[in-house]
Amino acid sequence: MQHIDKIYHLHNLLTSARHPIPLKTLQEKLGESERNMHRLTRFMRDRLNAPLEFKRGRGWQYREDQRGIYALPGFWLNDQELRALLTMQQLLGNLDPQLLKEELAPFKRRIAEILKKTTGKVGAVGDYIRLLPYNSRDRQYDCFQTLASACLQRQQVRVTYHNRSHDQSESRVLSPQMLIYYRDNWYLGAYCHNKGELHPFSLDRILTAEILALASQTIPPARLDDVFFSTFGIFSGTVQAVAVLRFTPEAARWVEGVTWHKNQVASWQPDGAYELRIPYSLPTELIGEILRFGEGVTVLEPPELRAAVCEKLEKMVANYQKSA
């Protein structure tokens, strides 16, 4: 009988028993030595949280208040898998300190308890994994749970959304499709019934959210990929152009091996320069990334993107000349 079968057998014996079962009886029924029986009971108690208790001189039983109630968990993990889960929980907590903090706390404590019982110690994951949030916005968790529920339940929501470009707040009815985590910030990919289009909505700009008793409009996955993931950045839309960027040999050291977009095409030039081709829709975010590399990059194509970057640089120079 395999290890897992023996645990199920032992569980069934203890569940149906009205009185403690002597150790010798359990050994006979499971075909195990006394030493292995102690290992099995210790595993069930420490790893599966079974309500086992030993009555001296009588044998093993489940506590009366748990008999017929306790059930074996759906899956079991070894020490390495438990540490991996604990690490993932820590990573999630570091990325988003407010996200599911209360919901994940019992899960984290339980894993830590199991590791401590089985290994005698458990190090704090935060001691050797540290993530530094970058450009994370405030208030993006005010409506997170409501919007996540609407995505999972496939229901429409009415939101109050503040448009940064126009500095105005307006009511919109949305069919949520997915939540997107991009550069330390959350966005709701949704179909806007007011505008009749798919659009990413920054969660920190959603001031209120109310789930409606209406089913969401379902958008095919291929269409969602085209709108939200086919071009560079978070700005939605299908590919409008391909940016061709030339990085100097010095700047190339920082760009080589970096994925700007899943469909990018990179190539080394004879003079040591690095050329990168990136599909994009709206150029706003791409321009900001280009400016970050300063004199280390030149836009070769398309002409309209090159002109837009030049215009930004001219305005920047003009601002400095005014303040000089």
Image (cartoon, rainbow, N blue to C red):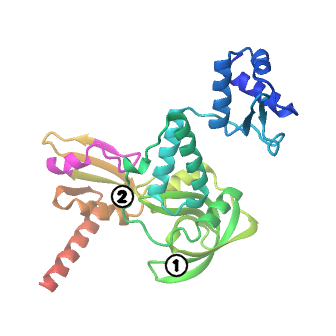
Pick whichever of labels 1 and 2 is earlier in the sequence: 2
Q: Secondary structure at mark 2?
A: loop
Give yes or no for residue 48 being in the magenta stretch: no
Q: Mark 2 Cα within 10 Å, few/some/many (few <14, many 20+)?
A: few
| Location of mark 2 (residue) | 132
For the residues labelled 1 and 2, the Cα–Cα distance comes to: 28 Å
Question: Is residue 257 shown above or below 291?
Answer: above
Residue at x 15%, y 49% (from the top left corner): 250
For the residue pair 82 and 259, the one nearer the viewer reads as: 82
Magenta extent = 247-266
Q: In front: 128, or 92?
A: 128
Badge 1 amino acid? His
At which x and y percent is residue 198? 57, 63
Q: Give the residue at x 40% y 45%.
A: 263
Quadrant, the N terminus: top right
Provide the residue designation for mark 1: 162
Q: Amino acid at mark 2?
A: Leu
Q: State which quarter of the image contains the C terminus.
A: bottom left
* Residue 182 sits above or below residue 17 on the image: below
How would you rate the neighbour count of disc 1 (Cα within 10 Å): few for under 14, some for 14-19, many for 20 or more?
A: some
| Image spot of residue 126 (x, y percent) | 41, 51
Q: Residue furthest front?
A: 57
